[in-house]
Image (spheres, grey):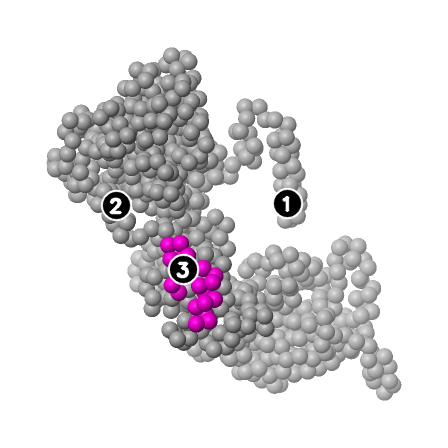
Amino acid sequence: MFNEYNPLKKTIFQIIDDNGKVINKAWMPDISDDRLIKAYKDMLFARTADLQIVSYQRQGRIYTYPPNYGQEAISGATGAIIGENDWMVPAFREMGAMLAKGVTLKELFLYFMGYEDGSKFQHAKFTLPISVPIASQLLHAAGIGYAIKYNKEQKVVFGFVGDGGTSEGDFHEAVNFAGVWKVPVIFIIQNNQYGISTPTSVQTASDSLAIKSVAYGVKGIKVDGNDFFAMYKAIQESVKVCLEGEGPVLIEALTYRKGAHTTSDDPTKYRTREEEEAWDIKDPLKRMKGYLKSKKLWSDAEEEKIIPQFKEEIDRQFIEAENYGPYPKEDVFKYLYAEMPDDLKEQERQYERFLQWKAAKVK
Amino acid sequence: MRYIFKFPDIGEGLEEGTIVEWHVEKGQTVQMGDPLCTMETDKVVTAIPSPKNGIIAAKFGKVGETVHVGSALVEIDIEGVEGSAAVDEANKVEPLEEGAGVVGTLEVAGNNAVLVASKEGVRSEEKNNTVGKKALSTPVARAIAHDMGVDINRIKGSGPAGRVTKDDVILFAKDGNKQTNPAVVSGETNIHALQPNLVDTEPLSQMRKTIAKNMIQSKHNAAHMTVFEEVEISELDRIRKKYKEPLAAEGIKLTYLAFIVKATAMSLKKFRALNSEMDFDKGVMLYKKYYNIGIAIDTEKGLVVPVIRNADKLSVKEIAVEINKISDKARDGKLTLEDMKDGTFTLTSYGSIGGLFAVPVINYPQAAILGIGRVSKRPVVKDDELAVGLVLPMSLSVDHRIADGGDTARFVNSIMGYLADPVSLIME
């Protein structure tokens, strides 16, 4: 696959067309019907939750939130493959993959409400917290990959970044060293066309983001990120490569951020309605649904029935998060280091004094 | 149960937003997630969804008006969602926060806004004429266009990707504007725009807009009548001086104002017309059985009127403590809507700065306002002898629709009586 779709050939790996019809039978992955339906439901759940969260944010019930809207197939395919013991190293637009690892919606809500506990996953193993400093997480992914290799474990690291993140030094350092060390890391670039408002065309002079893999001497592929099957197959092959000690792999997943960068962003200021409509045709859920309907595996009626159930569950978890209560003040200080250094201890004392002063003042 | 939904900070550190459109009416049933209105903020233009299921009991603010983050947007009745009786009930209710007794920072718009609230309002109407054409522009160009009163969406930009630059705006204002659309800019603003050094053009602050609106509303609706009086207060001065030191030791500043607030509250109890409000549309008078005295305070940003609640039940010392508290808050800009609402009568003591008599503007819809002038030593006649007296000038404006001359004069006499003989303040 990585020869056939070498990024130098400037091709894009695709399996279904815009309507969900298989156009690349040779690479069609073998997935059971049940697994497919579950994957679709997971993507639908993620989308429903995503839209709901934006509404909560507009009601003033949660802080800034970065929607996943339109990028669900990338997380969906990752979630369908990633193992319990594989490492998930997210950026901040991978809700589906995190839920698949066992992170709960409530935990994600807590994160966006500002709780440290929103990064302490009760059930998800080998999952790093959301990383907002762009591309910094890829260095962690490379480092974890090195540890896996050192310990001779059979595991893979999934490291995510956006197209904008590829312009960071961290991206270069991470992919470069992962290549030098030949570690089992799958770098997935969610190329959603914009780094906030900066279009990919002014992000890099390269023909693609996948082509950067050639310079690093690692395997790379440009995939239609709105094509669940192509993403699934590409990840499946990448896992194989990594487990054989031939990693890392760099996947450029071409997609489109249908929502805003975050709830503080207004995309109408930098892109056109026509462009959005052109991408609507390639919507990942629409395409997968097209395939499932053609195989009689899913219907609009089922979808209409299940969405209210999803909404109810999302609401339930949100209200739990809303009623979580105040966080202990030491949470602000204690999670950065295993042992708190002196300057941080001093900051904590200062903060305590400030709170005392404030309490006295308010009285 | 009533739930007041306050405009949330939907960006990161937003201060305000402008109402672009309302999607609900009073009495309408809403579900959580239903759009209430569309707001334009510095960051986004977006629908604001309802956080509750219920019935809209009140909406605050009109299209084009600016709403501060944390100010009430709608009031939702979240019980009795079913049945038309509930809807009728909702329709009956007056907005809780409306006319909250603030001259200055009333952030909630009243029903009878007589002014177009802001330039934004005008602009948003114009925007409707140029649907969907939102100009790309630099922040400085937008600021200049705003100051010049130019609609930036009409300008053809020369910058990258058609971006409107500062020079484009200036050029447009000079040449294109008058020919292409004379209606957009009045001749006057244009002259100012062309000779910017003659006039400093500054946008109205939210506070200034509110002050302007409330002043006009008062002058427009209330029939102002003002009576002037003088009261000799040497006895009050003697008492104040006696208690000033001990109270200062407790950190309390004892001023004449504390006595005046007390005298006013006690007099209001005797003359209910002065502590009332007229609802002309409904044909009713509202006589209030609580006595919340607003104190007009001059701050850097403008006039604010925090309220001393139930002043009739407080001692002079307690009133002094309250005055200290609200003055500190006003000076630090910490007053909240809560501090300023539900006033029933207002005092303005301009005399602490200067001025003997004035014609104070009523804090509408209250019935009256008492102005306190500068206290000074003056010749007075005592027991048919000329003596040096300490004279406090008072100016009382009343809404003559509500209070007749007789009651007004009797009310003033009552206050004068208390102040001339302060012991009477504790005799009732």
Residue A65: quarter of image: top left
Subunit bearing disc 3: B
Mark 1 Cα-neighbour bin, 10 Å: few <14, some 14–19, many ≥20: few
Residue A72: % across, % down: 29, 37
Q: Are the residues tagged 2 and 1 within 8 Å (C-beta)?
A: no
Q: Quadrant of the C terminus of chain B?
A: bottom right
Q: Which residues are magenta?
A: B155-175
Please tell me which residue is depicted at 43% across the width and 17% down the height of the picture.
A147
- Is label 2 or label 3 in front? 3
Front-most of A123 and B126?
B126
Front-most of B176 and B311?
B176
Subunit bearing disc 2: A
Q: Give the secondary structure at mark 2.
A: helix
User: Amino acid type of disc 1?
Assistant: Lys
User: Visible in this render: residue A253?
Assistant: yes
Q: Are the residues tagged 2 and 3 within 8 Å (C-beta)?
A: no
Left/right of residue B57 with respect to residue A31 in the rendered view: right
Q: Which residue is mark 2?
A: A279
Label 2, label 3: how far apart the Cα atoms are: 30 Å
Q: Give the secondary structure at mark 1.
A: helix
* Co-location on one chain, circles 2 and 3: no
Is residue B65 positioned above or below B376 on the image?
Answer: above
Residue A54: % across, % down: 37, 46
Q: Which residue is mark 1?
A: A358
Subunit bearing disc 1: A
User: Amino acid type of disc 3?
Assistant: Ser
Q: Which residue is mark 3?
A: B158
Residue A204: % across, % down: 38, 38
Is residue B90 positioned above or below A129 on the image?
Answer: below
- Is label 2 or label 1 in front? 2
Residue B202: quarter of image: bottom right
